[in-house]
Image (cartoon, rainbow, N blue to C red):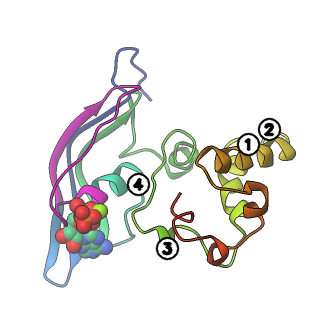
Amino acid sequence: MIMTADAPLLAVDRLSTAFETETGWLRAVDQVSFTLEAGTILGLVGESGCGKSVTALSLMRLLPQPVGRIESGSIRLNGTELVTLAPPAMQRIRGGRMAMIFQEPMTALNPVYRIGRQLLEVFDLHRPDIPIDERQAAAVALLSHVGIPEAAARMRAYRTRFPAGCASG
Ligand SMILES: Nc1ncnc2c1ncn2[C@@H]1O[C@H](COP(=O)(O)OP(=O)(O)OP(=O)(O)O)[C@@H](O)[C@H]1O
Ligand SMILES: [Mg+2]
């Protein structure tokens, strides 16, 4: 692991990602490079299918397996190379240091588990040091913060009970 004080928060260098298809490996992301400084916002803009989501899935190391593969390039978060990072180390970063809001709101929450259980998973995995009642209070506060009414009750609800628009946050 290389930590460099002056490295950008995120540095993507010539990232290429491919999918295995019936006609062979097809490159969906081709030599994409960008950097992101801490405290800044970067928008990736392009026509449908140009590779925005596949770029994000590559950064999160969430490409569908085994059909999706990072072919080449580098993704450094605070100087740490993510492309070759061992799965347990990547698991600690994913959801803790780096997160993705998925595109399809209706599939983002699992309909068979209560909302609260799904929201608390990220705290349970990354901040088990925080007492459980404080984790729950933090999740309720986050729901309130984004304008969801009766947040404590919503924690006990299922996705299908969420009013349209609230499930996507
Ligand atoms: N699992 C997969 N297998 C094969 N090809 C895939 C797979 N997932 C994505 N692709 C292809 O990768 C390319 C980039 O798709 P991607 O979803 O990143 O586009 P996008 O820029 O996010 O589009 P949109 O604006 O519609 O969200 C597309 O051609 C898509 O068909
Ligand atoms: Mg997309």
Q: Give the mark nearer the N terminus: 2 vs 1.
A: 2
Q: Earlier in the sequence, mark 1 or mark 4?
A: 4
* Residue picked out by circle 4: 61
Q: Is residue 154 left or right of residue 6?
A: right
Determine the secondary structure under disc 3. helix
Q: Are marks 2 and 3 in contact (CB under 8 Å)?
A: no
Earlier along the polypeptide chain: callout 2 or callout 4? 4
For badge 3, the amino acid type reads: Met
How many residues crowd mark 2 within 10 Å: few (<14), some (14–19), many (20+)?
Answer: few
Q: Nearer the viewer, mark 1 or mark 4?
A: 1
Q: Tell whether 18 sits left or right of 104.
A: left
Indicate which disc residue 106 carries: 3
> Residue 104: x percent and y percent?
42, 69
Tell me the crowding category of disc 3: few under 14, some 14 to 19, or many 20 or more residues within 10 angstroms, Cα based. some
Which residue is at a point 41% across and 28% down the rendered structure image?
78
Can you identify the residue that label 2 sits on?
130
Please tell me whether residue 127 belongs to the stretch shown in magenta: no
Q: Tell me the residue that label 1 is attached to.
A: 138
Are the residues flagged by discs 3 and 4 in contact, CB closer than 8 Å?
no
Badge 2 amino acid: Ile
- The answer to whether mark 2 and mark 1 are in CB contact below 8 A is yes
**Which is closer to the viewer, label 3 or label 4?**
3
Q: Which residues are magenta?
A: 29-54
Rendering coords of residue 119 (x, y %): 66, 56
- Residue at the (37%, 71%) spot, across then down: 66
Q: Is mark 4 within 8 Å of ligand 1?
A: no
Judged from the image, the secondary structure of the residue bearing numbered disc 4 is loop
